[in-house]
Image (spheres, rainbow, N blue to C red):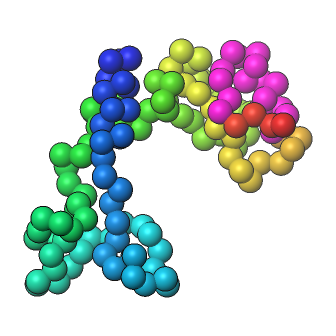
Amino acid sequence: MRRLLRLRNLMNRKRPRFMRMNVQGLKRLEDSWRRPRGLDNKIRICRRGYPEIVSIGFRGPRAVRGLHPSGLREVLVYNPGQLEGLNPRRHCVRIASSVSRRKRAEIMERASKMKLRVLNPSI
């Protein structure tokens, strides 16, 4: 597992930044990936000198896909009841942004009792 996480980190460093077509020239476009379309599109036909296109070869190892860099599976929590059934050796907790301060404190207290790691603890 640790070897695969290291490999994923190395792959992430080598992975290009996938750019939306024309994003560097047009201020109104957001820099979020959109598949290039069009008959003569140079990015779509993978011409040299143009940005890389998203493809399956850039994926990380299957066993660590979707895991937190610590190797734990992230679980989004909205209330203290959702902490039930979580294993501290397999799961880490991220408290949702819409949770109030009082409920956040309850979740933090319950997570510390269960020895669960909280990724965004309250300050």
Q: Give how far across and how far down residue 91 sits, in percent.
A: 54, 25
Q: Give how far across and how far down residue 114 sits, in percent.
A: 70, 16
Q: Is residue 6 left or right of residue 113?
A: left
Quadrant for residue 35, please give it.
Answer: bottom left
Q: Residue at x 43, y 84 (%)?
A: 26
User: Magenta-highlighted stretch: main secondary structure?
Assistant: helix
Q: Give how far across and how far down residue 65 sits, in percent.
A: 35, 36
Q: Is residue 49 left or right of residue 99?
A: left
Residue 46 visible? The answer is: no
Residue 14 visible? The answer is: yes
Quadrant of the rendering where the C terminus is positioned: top right
Query: Measured along the vertical axis of the image, is residue 95 above or below residue 72?
Result: below
Q: Residue furthest right?
A: 102
Q: Report the span colored magenta.
A: 104-119
Quadrant for residue 112, please give it.
Answer: top right
Q: Residue at x 31, y 75 (%)?
A: 21
User: How many discs mark residues in the rendered view?
Assistant: 0
Q: Is residue 45 left or right of residue 33?
A: left
Q: Residue at x 38, y 32 (%)?
A: 9
Quadrant of the rendering where the N terminus is positioned: top left
Query: Measured along the vertical axis of the image, is residue 21 above or below residue 7?
Result: below
Q: In front: 22, or 64?
A: 22
Q: Residue at x 30, y 42 (%)?
A: 14
Q: Is residue 110 left or right of residue 63?
A: right
Find out whether residue 29 is within the magenta segment. no
Q: Give how far across and how far down residue 89 sits, in percent.
A: 54, 15
Q: In front: 68, or 85?
A: 68
